[in-house]
Image (cartoon, grey):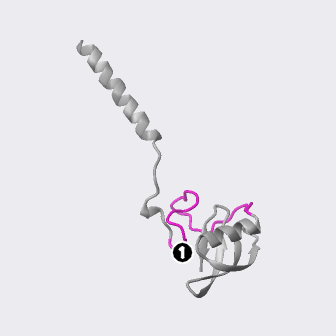
Amino acid sequence: MRMFIGIAVILALGLWIVMAQTGTRTPTAASTLPGTTSSAPAVSLAANEMPPLKGANSFTEAQVKDRIEAAGYTQVSALVKDQDGIWRGNAMKGGASVRIAFDFKGNVVAS
């Protein structure tokens, strides 16, 4: 009987460990980046990555404009994709004109 209980405990512990490793995680405040408009980046970033990130950008101009406006900017204009795959342009937020950048991971960055 003791052996049966011991095996059951070991199996339960193993199942608990597996479930803990596959659970979903929610973004924390530590994952937010200065200058971004979202509480969490569009995609997880490595510790040494700071948006806007260089990379092949498949977003269309219309998609970029929609996402920038969804981030709270208005009057988005002059969007041009540069040689690094970063969409750059102008926008308004809080009554101020800002330069805006949108990278291939969907990060919106104002400067």
Viewer-side residue, 33 vs 98: 98
Q: Is residue 66 left or right of residue 24?
A: right
Residue under numbered circle 1: 35
Report the residue at 53% width, 67% height from top: 38
Quarter-of-image position of residue 44 = bottom right
- Number of numbered discs overlaid on the protein picture: 1
- SS class of the residue under badge 1? loop
Judged by its main secondary structure, the magenta piece is: loop
Q: List the single residue furthest toward the top.
A: 1
Q: Position of residue 32 (x, y in %)?
A: 48, 66
The residue segment tinted magenta is 34-59
Asked where in the image residue 88 lies, by quadrant, the reply is bottom right
- Rendered residue at 74%/76% (across/down): 79
Tell me residue 34's x, y (percent).
50, 73
Q: Hey, what amino acid is under mark 1?
A: Gly
Please provide percent x and percent y for residue 33. 50, 68
User: Is 107 rendered above or below residue 11?
Assistant: below
**Is residue 36 highlighted in magenta?**
yes
- Binning the other alpha carbons within 10 Å of mark 1 as few (below 14), some (14 to 19) or many (20 upward) gives some
Apparent side of residue 61 relative to residue 20 in the rendered image (left or right): right
- Does 37 appear in magenta? yes
> In which quadrant of the rendered image does the C terminus lie?
bottom right
Q: Is residue 52 above or below residue 97?
A: above
The residue at 58%/74% (across/down) is 72
Q: Position of residue 68 (x, y in %)?
A: 64, 71
Q: In the displayed structure, would residue 25 be above or below residue 74?
A: above
Dividing the picture into quadrants, the one containing residue 42 is bottom right
Q: Quadrant of the N terminus?
A: top left
